[in-house]
Amino acid sequence: MPPHESPLPLDRALHPCRWPGFFRLYPLRQLFWAVVVVCVAPAMLAQEATHQARGFLHRGQAALEAGDFERATQSFEQARQLAPDDIQAARGLVLSYLQDGRVAQALAIGHNAVEHWPQDAQLHHWLGLAFFKNGQNTEAAAELTRAQQLDGRSFDIHFDLALVLLAEKQYSPAADELQKAIKLKSSSALAHVLLGRAYQNTNRTVEAVQQFQSALQIDRNIPLGHYHLGFAFASLGKNHEAIAEYQKELVRSPENPDVLFQIGHTQLEIGDWKSAVLNLRRTTEVSAQNADAFYDLGKGLLLQGDFAQGVAALRQAVSFSPSDPSPHYQLARAFEKMGDKQQAGEEWQRFAEAKKSQRESGGMATGRVH
């Protein structure tokens, strides 16, 4: 055997505490300290690294709770460098990047983390949210579904999966997820609102009303709660109840163009033309390219006998939505009443062409009764 090779197995050859003759080479006191340094130092270094990592984890969590996401990412990254197999560091880092709006980093860390811990529901959850924020809804739904399979008792997972499904207009599956979420946490007013919207979009309007009412019982200030309830009432033909709800929402959101438009539209439906024109004009002021608002405003002005301003509003509607036949219909009738047969004929022709074009593409897009 060559003199430089150890006659011992590799593990013994690399560990001084196991060398034969080791005790003959050192005096007793020196021997003691040599053994302590060689045998204990690696364990001490590992303990020190773990202790430091724990400190960074605590600082990262504190920063996360305080909303200091940049400091949180720094702390969790330092913890991950010291303890790469610590799942808490990986979770905290992905979440911190998400909260800080650094979606690309959240995706990169999240991908690596779910490969390392494929059975962790929370990591799949955060990765799903990163995909959602990045506009990758298919991937987001897949990750959140996997998270749900791993942890079916999480309100947040069901809720966030429902958000993705709503964004994809998959209203029935979204309703299923929100029902599960509400069973786990019935006090979430927002979950009730979103479930109501899912019901509304699947023609379950009565159930939608119940959900919006539940949301308002939990939190009477839930954003757009009265608006959604008003819209559901209007869908049921309960226009006066709808207007009452819109007016409650208008107190909270006086410049919201959706609220202004719906209250004006509904007032037009019940024949309150003066109030309708007022709210529809306000809508066009805060939403200057709102074709629907200009259409309804023009219609309301014509009903009041104000043909000049009515025609002007309808012309605006045409400019913002040139393929919509409805403004041309109203213009044609207006010009007929004004005795302008030439312009009336031109508008009837435009109306016929626009309507024919919409039939070819699947029918009336607006669904209006002219």
Image (spheres, rainbow, N blue to C red):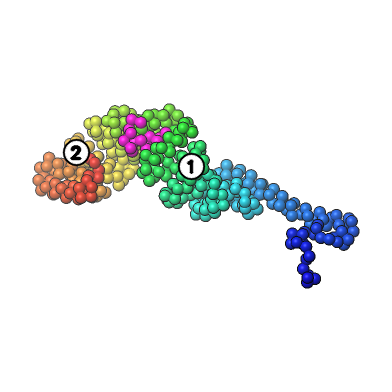
Which x, y percent locates residue 180? 45, 35
Residue beneath label 1, please? 148
Which of discs 2 and 1 lies nearer the camera? The answer is 1
**Residue occupying the point 27% across, 36% down:** 265
Q: Amino acid at mark 1?
A: Gln
Count numbered badges in the picture.
2
**Residue occupying the point 62% across, 53% down:** 84
- Relative to 39, say whether 334 is above or below: above
Quadrant in which residue 197 is drawn: top left
Q: Mark 2 vs mark 1: which is more N-terminal?
A: 1
Q: Amino acid at mark 2?
A: Leu
Please rate how many residues cluster around mark 1, counting C-alpha atoms within 10 Å: few if below 14, some from 14 to 19, many from 20. Answer: many
Q: Main secondary structure of the magenta part?
A: helix
Do we see residue 82 in this rendering?
yes
Of residue 6 and residue 324, the one placed in the foreground of this image is 6
Residue beneath label 2, please? 302
Q: Which residues are magenta?
A: 192-207
**Residue occupying the point 76% across, 54% down:** 41
Q: Quadrant of the N terminus?
A: bottom right
Do we see residue 133 in this rendering?
no
| Residue 32 included in the magenta stretch of the image | no
